[in-house]
Amino acid sequence: MSTTYALAKEQFAALGLDTEAAIDRLLALPISIHCWQGDDVAGFEQGGGSLSGGIAATGNHPGKARTPAELMADLDQVLALAPGKHKLNLHAIYAVTDEPVPRDRLAPEHFAPWVDYARARGLGLDVNPTLFSHPLAADGMTLSHPDGAVRRFWIDHCKAMRRVGRHFAQELGQVCVNNIWIPDGLKDTPADRLGPRARLKDALDEILADPADPALLIDTVESKVFGIGLESYTVGSHEFYLSYAAKTGCVCLLDNGHYHPTETVSDKIPSLLLFADRLALHLTRGVRWDSDHVVTWNDELLEIAKEVVRCGALDRVLLSLDYFDASINRIAAWVIGLRNVRKALLAALLLPHPQLRALQDRRDFTRLLALQEEYKLLPVGAVWDELCARAGVPVGTDWIGQAEAYEAAILPKRNPAGN
Ligand code: RNT
Ligand code: ZN
């Protein structure tokens, strides 16, 4: 145990906080790593499709992963540099197939290398149907499309991916989160807002008709405010999915890039937890829009972490990352966000919430603000370093050199243009 940690431990103990318990709790908490940071959401269909659906990865840093083997090798680097328990979050377009397989016919065997990869590393797998980057999604509508044949294809795809998700859980002995996000929307003012939403509701009813065994599969639905080229109307809005989840029992997934810029996910967390057993989060960082920048240690990340901890909901909130920055080393992008999420949760665990809550209830707002500000400089960093040391990952800034060495040794052998 380092001297700095021993001193920090004492300082937190004086506030009634147990740093040992916080470290143990956090090392056991699963955070789902999004596979799509490694290749700018390209996937492996016919050599990797071009991203559509109103989302965009910008930047052309060299060395992105082009094959399953490259993506797996990059993920191994990430796992070596970020402490704690992880899951891996796969999109359907990351299926590994010799011949092209239509998405509505994807099956567990098309993901066998990922199951092997996860099993060898003790990871759970999460899953997402991919309702974008496809000719049948090119006009911006999928499950809400007016053409029944298009809806049928996407309904069958979503059903297929639920079967894949169940298989993941059975193989790996860990529950699989299946998240449905669709890009559906319109560029300009709609003539009919109800019709597409009614079609989406019917499609979801059919996809989810076969009830999930909650030990195997948790179905989540992710809303959005707008997409690029789909600015005026989003079929799967927050109200739509909030109501749908309340009525049917599937789980709301909140992506903190998917709200109006002054609206915060942190404020929504307690309200949802009062009415639902579970809640899922995509952690990202929007800069001016849903730009999916790397998650940084900012006020909203800390507020989200504090809400989850204060609600006593670390085991009810399903945490995953969701961003895709192609302008910097992609492994570093993954690691920076992952480390920040766990660091923010540690900072949240190391606050004397009962004391602060009592001040609010006593309406002593002066002392509350004074303490909230002073506590921002508590020695969380010393506890974080100890956590990393115990997890066997680099402490402090040491991981950066390792990521750079990997970049220098491996990435130049890939296409230097980043494609
Ligand atoms: C898009 C959603 C969605 C995607 C991933 C790739 O705005 O956030 O979660 O980012 O499914
Ligand atoms: Zn998301």
Image (spheres, grey):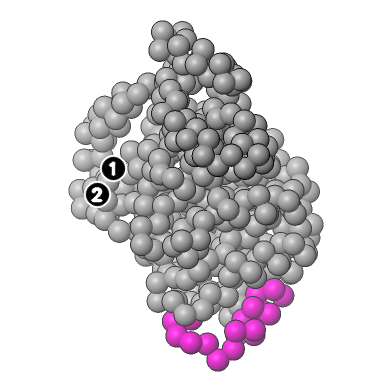
Q: Which mark is residue 329?
A: 1
| Relative depth, front residue between 13 and 106 | 13
Q: Is residue 63 left or right of residue 198?
A: left
Q: Is residue 227 left or right of residue 118?
A: left
Residue at 46% x, 58% y is 257
Residue at 24% x, 54% y is 60
Locate the C terminus by quadrant. Answer: bottom left
User: Which residue is at the far bottom?
Assistant: 191
Q: What element does badge 2 sit on?
A: loop
Circles 2 and 1 in contact, beta carbons < 8 Å: yes
Residue at 65% x, 70% y is 240
Q: What element does badge 1 sit on?
A: loop
| Relative depth, front residue between 106 and 132 | 132
Q: Whole-percent x and y of residue 409?
A: 23, 32
| Relative depth, front residue between 58 and 264 | 264
Residue at 45% x, 11% y is 7
Q: Residues within 10 Å of mark 2 (few under 14, many from 20)?
A: some
Q: Amino acid at mark 2?
A: His
Q: Whole-percent x and y of residue 49?
A: 39, 63
| Relative depth, front residue between 167 and 11 | 11
Q: How many marks?
A: 2
Q: Which mark is residue 61?
A: 2
Q: Is residue 136 left or right of residue 330?
A: right
Q: Earlier in the sequence, mark 2 or mark 1?
A: 2
Q: Which residues are magenta?
A: 186-203
Against 213, is 385 above or below? above
Question: Residue 28, located in which quarter of the rendered image?
Answer: top right
Q: Which mark is residue 131?
A: none
Can residue 228 be seen here? The reply is yes
Q: Amino acid at mark 1?
A: Asn
Q: Whole-percent x and y of residue 3?
A: 41, 8
CA–CA distance between discs 2 and 1?
Answer: 7 Å
